[in-house]
Image (cartoon, rainbow, N blue to C red):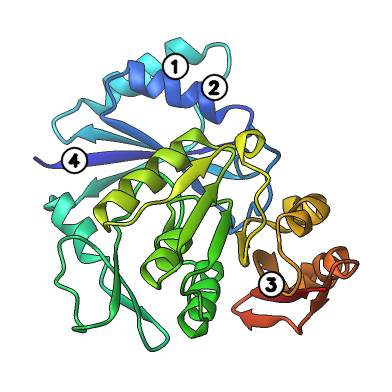
Amino acid sequence: MAWIQFIFGSTPDDAEALSDHLLECGASAVTFQDNEDQPIYEPEIGTTPLWAATNVIALFDATTDVDIIISMLTSMMAPAPVPNYRIEAVEDKDWVREWMDNFHPMSFGERLWICPSWHTPPQEGAVNIMLDPGLAFGTGTHPTTALCLNWLDQADVKDKIVIDYGCGSGILAIAAALLGAKKVIGVDTDPQALEATQANAERNGVVIDTYLPDDCPAETCDLLLANILAGPLQSLSEHLAGLTKSGAPIVLSGILDVQAQDVSESYQPWFDMEAPILKDEWVRLVGQKR
């Protein structure tokens, strides 16, 4: 099937309503896109902010009558005008295959690999985490995840208790389990992330205990991993310190380089903090519990 897409220039205040109108007009899909390369690093919990300049992109069957769509929108949005737009043809492709072809096995250090399920693990005898892109975050492509995986690749976690705080897809928790940890706990505020962690753990043949923060047992660990964001990491510093055994390391990421000093200072009352390790604009912080 061939397609066309309408691309409307919009704003955060108008984008949701415009999306609803386009779906009523018969759009097969509507997506939002940043139109000015404006990053959104730390949204408030429970919010999904949009960019100051947001493109609303609606996909329609190529046989759609463009004039009818614009006429319907004009009626729905009156007295407000229809935003500026352009129309583009979309090449017909096997979109599932196109999507799958974008993901390949990735190595992290000497022994850790992340492999999509449709690929054969490339290195026999390596620690292979079978993980597909999904709804919860974390497939190893983001610098913060890569920083944590590279650290784990060099670490000795055999027979240790590990907490992955903010587990997302469970990628770090699963890596720790496959590397020999005797018990791994995943914590996240999003129930969907806990479901994803359990599904991915089952696929990899490991057991991860998952909890919402309020339900997490007060058990101290031999290693705490927290790949979240700078704001939550700072507010959680005392709590995470309380979950970490004396002498144990804590690994923190999700931190922009300009935020590293403030986050490090938040943990210094309990940890001896090492210098940050930088990848692109992001850093990893490691500390040793006193």
Left or right of residue 13, residue 10 in this image: left
Reading the chain from its start, which is encountered first: label 4 or label 3?
Answer: 4
Q: Secondary structure at mark 4?
A: strand
Crowding at dot 3, Cα within 10 Å, few <14 / some 14-19 / many 20+, comes out as: some
282 relative to 93 in the view: left or right: right
Q: Are marks 2 and 1 in contact (CB under 8 Å)?
A: yes
Alpha carbon of mark 1 to alpha carbon of mark 4: how far? 22 Å
211 vs 170, left or right, is right
Along the viewing direction, whichever of 187 and 246 lies nearer the viewer:
246
Residue nearest the observer in this picture, 84 or 243: 243
Which type of secondary structure does the marked residue at label 3 adopt? loop
- Which part of the image, by quadrant, shows the C terminus? bottom right
Query: For mark 4, does the 10 Å Cα neighbourhood hold few (<14), some (14 to 19), or many (20 or more) residues?
Result: some
Give 282 or 107, whichever is nearer the viewer.
107
- Number of numbered labels in the structure image: 4
**Amino acid type assigned to the residue bearing label 4 in the image:** Trp
The answer to which of marks 1 and 4 sits earlier in the sequence is 4
- In the image, residue 15 sits, relative to residue 202, either above or below, namely above
Q: Quadrant of residue 144?
A: bottom right
User: Which mark identifies residue 3?
Assistant: 4
Disc 2 packing (10 Å; few <14; some 14–19; many ≥20): few
The residue beneath circle 1 is 74
Rounded to the nearest angstrom, the CA distance separating label 1 from label 3 is 62 Å
Question: In the picture, which quadrant includes the N terminus?
Answer: top left
Query: How far, Cα to Cα, is label 4 from label 2?
Result: 25 Å
Dots 2, 3 in contact, CB < 8 A: no
Whether residue 41 is visible here, answered yes or no, is yes
